[in-house]
Image (spheres, rainbow, N blue to C red):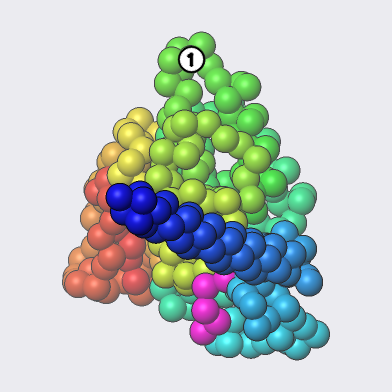
Amino acid sequence: MDNFEELPLNNLNNLNNSANDLVEFDNEIDNEIDNKIETIKSKKCLECKTYFAQCDKNYCSDCEFGVLYHGIDLSIEQIINLPKCSFKSKQINEHLEEIYDVYKIKKGLQNKLIKNINLFKTILNICKGKTPQEIFTILDGQTDYCCACLLPYKYADQLLEQSLENCPKELENNKYKYVHAIAPFYFDVWNSQYKDSVFECYYKNLGQLTRCPTEISHLYELWNRCVYLSHKVDLNGAELCNCKVCNKIVKIEQYKIRCKSCYNYFHTNCVDTTINSRCTKCPMCSAKWNINKIDRVDYGSVFAY
């Protein structure tokens, strides 16, 4: 019986020793893993010192291309072909005007980027006290005041702030319309300091615009808004200018013709009285119009060539 009593005790000691060995082994593994984690954590990017670099590199993925191309002037094509990273975003932002010039040629746009402070002040004064509809038509170049334009964020923010502050009492409950009137004409909306739910909702399909897009297609989509989203603003009742034939007001919802050479507006009926054939001349600049070749745009307007 004594032998039978000692056998389980010996087995128990052996099991205890094995368990202790396993615990020590686990502790060694844990320590090794902790040391490796600490090594990885301590290897922060040498450039930004914020993000972590991969084990075999000294820079995070965002800074890697900035270091690689430091001091090198990249062409627009090279910038466009860079992979997504903050360096690409910065490069696009720095060369934004050049990229916009390429876009304008590609799309055949007339929208002028307003860079001159005196020209902007003129636009600011013209838009003071105007309704959202009138401001949209001014920025869209549909009036005699100025050409179609895009505004850098510092100018667009200022115009939006002025419009909201000087909002007429009858539009007090419809201030959001000013956002819809001015938002399409932001050149670099991601730099804007103006933040509210209506403004952010306007661009929601493009995600959080906290920095310049890294995809040119997204950039073009932003700029396309000033061309294709006029239907988002109720423009009925907005006055454009005086017809150059009858000198009466041309309203945006009326049928009208705009010469693509001198950009003057005419009531369709006023011009029709001078048409004796399928080809006629502009009453102001004498540019020949081919009535068979016109661009139809919103609100009954046509461009005559």
Q: Nearer the viewer, residue 305 or 197?
A: 197
Residue 278: x %, y % from top left: 19, 71
Q: Residue at x 32, y 65 (%)?
A: 304
Q: Nearer the viewer, residue 272 or 232?
A: 232
Residue 38: x %, y % from top left: 69, 63
**Within 10 angstroms of label 1, few (less than 14), some, or many (20 or more) residues?**
few
Q: Nearer the viewer, residue 297 or 86?
A: 86
Magenta-tinted stretch:
80-85
Q: Secondary structure at mark 1?
A: helix
| The image quarter in which residue 232 lies | top left
Is residue 110 visible in the rendered structure shown here?
A: no
Q: Residue at x 52, y 79 (%)?
A: 83
Q: What's the magenta bit mostly, secondary-structure-wise?
A: loop
Q: Residue at x 73, y 43 (%)?
A: 121
Q: Quadrant of the C terminus?
A: bottom left
237 horizontally vs 41: left or right = left
| The image quarter in which residue 258 lies | bottom left
Location of mark 1 (residue): 172
Residue 117 sits above or below residue 95 on the image: above
